[in-house]
Image (cartoon, rainbow, N blue to C red):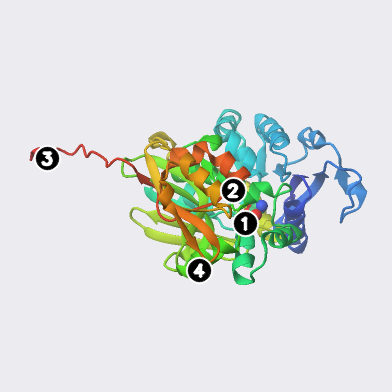
Amino acid sequence: MDADKQPLRIGLVGFGCVGQGFYDILQQQPNLGLRVTRIAVKNPTKPRTLPAERFSYHADELLADPELDLLVEVIDDPAEAFRLVSTALRQGRRVVTANKAMLARHLPELVQLQATFGGTLLYEAAVCGSIPVIRTLDAYFSHEPLRSVSGIFNGSSNYVLTRMSEEGSDYAPALAEAQALGFAETDPALDMGAFDPRSKAVILAAHAYGVFLNTEEVLNLGIEGIGAADIAYAAALGQKIKVVAALERLTNGRVTALVTPQLVGPESPLYAVEREFNGVVLEAEYAGTQFLQGRGAGGHPTGSAVLADVLAVQRGTHYGYAKQDTAPEAQLLEELEVEVYLRHADEGVLREVLTWLELPADAIQHDGYGPYATGVVALQQLFAWRKELRQNGVFVARQGAVRLTAPVVQEAASAWA
Ligand code: HSE
């Protein structure tokens, strides 16, 4: 840093796992020309690693402080995060956030606020922790058509799956470990129910395809109902169960999105992604297949992504959203089907599930663990019954790619040639 250059003054809102990770990295790299001058937290009674006088208990004080050059928002309350970030953008400020739920819900409005008021919002830390996937899609692949973007976008659920399959651990202690290691959300149902990776998929869709999806319309099925029987079923096929988020350009040109457990074989790079690691497979039209892997959760990996954004903001970086003007339509559920594996220990429940999903009664089979079923179901049915499936602890995994139910009628003139 130049001796006469003032450090960039950062206002940090939130001092949880990510906030502390970011702060800690900065302490270890004092020559970056960055200084956290103010920190706002919510709870004045919570024990902290820094003296009490370092904290403000009113984030609005930071918004009102003209001395701050940049705000870093890393709280876990999406509504409050939106209030803070949108207010800061209305002031034309530069903001870095890691709040995926907030971004997935409000991205079009936040993009508009940047355009109107001249501020900047970067959020690499919101998706796949330390993996630079947003900037890869937004900048490097800004004009490259992508066939699909898929991967493991949640570290906590992947950690649980790894512990269950490698160590034979039960679900509850594996989840408790993921929480203790600082990987899980405050409400771990967001991780285990695949709500968190759904938000990340929605954010990536804006950069990969220029499509702003409605989060609530994207199917997400989680692993709350998983048991040793499911892990063993996959292993017997030489596969593993992974929670895979997929954005895909269909043969009709539209883009679809979903997040579900999936049986994954060793031919996929996702097969070897374990513990809190995340992985993203990009199928690009001209560049071909690429695979990014890295730590998807944890204070330091996520804090590292926040720091990268802060430095990028300092350099004047903005996201381009280059594909917005040519964005394809979203095809979320209609006319789509997928092959699934379903299990519930109670055959009566499983039978009822088959009626919900319009599968024949003879879809039920048995193995050493009890009854399970396989078959091709309409995505619309899975979406319609998703809450009942979750509440009843039914485990559902997809066994292949999502496909259109009706073949696409080609409009090419070749038929007449
Ligand atoms: N709870 C999230 C996960 C943190 O487990 O991936 C990172 O977004």
Disc 4 to disc 2: CB gap under 8 Å: no
Residue pointed to by mark 4: 235
- CA gap between label 1 and label 2 equals 8 Å
Where is residue 351 shown, x and y percent of the image? 50, 47
**Quadrant placement of the N terminus:** bottom right
Residue pointed to by mark 1: 157
Residue pointed to by mark 2: 194
Amino acid under disc 4: Ala
- CA gap between label 4 and label 2 equals 22 Å
Badge nearest the viewer, 1 or 3: 1
Task: Report the disc number at residue 415.
Answer: 3
Look at the numbered disc 1 and say if its residue's Cβ is closer than 8 Å to ligand 1: yes
Disc 2 to disc 3: CB gap under 8 Å: no
Q: Label 1 neighbourhood size at 10 Å, few (<14), some (14-19), many (20+)? A: many
Task: Say which label, 4 or 2, has the lower sequence index.
Answer: 2
Disc 4 to disc 1: CB gap under 8 Å: no
- CA gap between label 2 and label 3 equals 44 Å
Look at the numbered disc 4 and say if its residue's Cβ is closer than 8 Å to ligand 1: no
Disc 1 to disc 2: CB gap under 8 Å: yes
Badge nearest the viewer, 4 or 3: 4
Q: Say left or right for 196 vs 2.
A: left
- CA gap between label 1 and label 3 equals 49 Å
- CA gap between label 4 and label 3 equals 46 Å
Task: Say which label, 4 or 1, has the lower sequence index.
Answer: 1
